[in-house]
Amino acid sequence: MSNNKVALITGITGQDGYYLSKLLLEKDYVVHGTVRRSSNINTDRIDPLISEYSSDGRLILHYSDLLDSSSLSSLVNLIQPDEIYNLAAQSHVNVSFKNPIFTTQVGTLGALSIMEAIRYSDKKIKFYQASSSEMFGGEEKTMLSEESPLIPKSPYAASKIFAHHMAQIYRDSYDLFMTNGILFNHESPKRGETFVTRKITKALGRIVHGIQSKLTLGNLEASRDWGFAGDYVEGMYLMMQYDVPEDWVLATGETHTVKEFLDIAFKTVNLNWEEYVKTSEKYFRPNEVDYLLGDSSKAREVLNWKPSVDFKGLVKIMVEHDINEAKKDFTLLKDNLISPTWEYPKL
Ligand code: NAP
Ligand code: G4F
């Protein structure tokens, strides 16, 4: 019988799913992950981990969907994990205005289905809920902590608040280990390509290689506390190793506008962003979170967590990665294997 700890990660195919599964595998966990069936294989991010860890049974994937509560409860029964990290969500805020019912079903009942499976399990299973700084609403220019009021501005934020409160209620009512990580924005080369940071660095790489000529964005004045995803999954792990389940903010303590991100990114390759970027109503939201700045003193003092990558470092990592990626696209284009799309992405 193996002594390895067993974790179940929902949303393992996403940005954080990649970094968290890598971290846990390096810590000798057996990692199970849920994957949604899609018409194209959607495991790109974790393919390197699959090839390294699946043959010896350390990384095991299961078809599941947060909307299918019976598949979740049978998975929990089958695997009997020590820890469950609920990362699955329709995580794009603007899309949540367009698909509010789906976003809400996944964010609320999806999360609750896992909590119910844990409640009826014979084993004491620790649970991590991916809460979000989006829940704060960013009404005022203040530092936000675990005690700050929650003022949702989107269906996404409202659904995250429901799951956040249910984790607290299950913690208090049934003495279960339900921890909430209230994470401020965290980015990386694995970030989805329609989130603003990656959209910018992806486009910049393509501009550098001459295969894109412009970039259309929305609100450039919005300000975010942006950190590196690799640092934030370390924080998730630390929260789950702490003696008691609590709520924890992870943030860098610095905030920057989209304009500042553009400025630093374009300057790394000696370009002026104003010559390439335009804005369109299409990317403005019906209700905007203007300003997010986090106070993560509790996690820093109690968990000894701190981010290792600063804002400029983050921009540099992402720009360098996407310039290399675009070089591959350029080569394929040159050999006529793909046709030019002058602006990317279309969504
Ligand atoms: P992401 O890249 O969008 O990944 C989301 C994951 O959820 C993907 O694996 C996705 O699967 C899966 N998923 C979506 N709908 C699902 C459903 N109905 N059933 C099962 N799985 C489903 O998000 P992320 O950036 O890694 O974020 C991880 C979590 O942290 C999310 O819950 C997000 O809301 C939250 N969060 C993120 C940030 C941030 O800045 N990144 C900050 C605070 C909180 P597919 O690959 O098939 O789409
Ligand atoms: O990159 P974003 O889409 O991230 P947003 O809305 O802050 O949400 C992310 O962080 C949350 C944590 O606070 C997570 F919970 C959530 O799952 C997600 O990971 O947008 C950042 C800002 C917004 O103010 C947006 O209006 O950038 C602005 N923006 C300007 N132009 C744009 C664009 N955002 C996107 N996605 N695309 C644009 O063209």
Image (cartoon, helix red, strand yellow):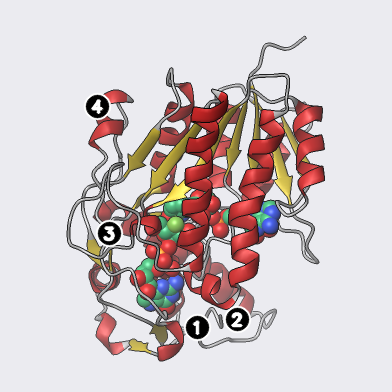
The residue that mark 2 highlights is 334
Which residue is under mark 1? 211
Residue that carries the numbered disc 4 in the rendered image: 301
* Picture layout, residue 153 above or below residue 188: below
Residue 328, how many percent across, how many down? 57, 68
The kind of residue tagged 3 is: Leu
- Label 4 sits on what residue type? Glu
Q: Secondary structure at mark 3?
A: loop
Numbered badge on residue 224:
none
**Image quadrant in which you'd find residue 182:** top left
Residue drawn at 44 percent across, 21 percent down = 244
Could you say which quadrant of the image residue 261 lies in?
bottom left
Choose mark 2 or mark 1, whichever is in front.
1
Residue ID at (30%, 39%): 308
- Looking at the image, which residue is at 62% across and 46% down? 111
Q: Amino acid at mark 2?
A: Lys
- State how far apart marks 2 and 4 are (Cα): 53 Å
Q: Between residues 18 and 235, which one lies in front from this camera angle?
A: 235
Q: Nearer the viewer, mark 2 or mark 3?
A: 3
From the image, which quarter does the C terminus lie in? bottom right
**Front label number (1 vs 3):** 3
CA separation in Å, label 1 and label 3? 34 Å
Which label's residue is closer to the chain start, 4 or 1?
A: 1
Q: Which mark is residue 292?
A: 3
- The tag earlier along the polypeptide, 4 or 3, is 3
N-term-proximal mark, 2 vs 3: 3
Three-letter amino acid code at the position of disc 1: Ile
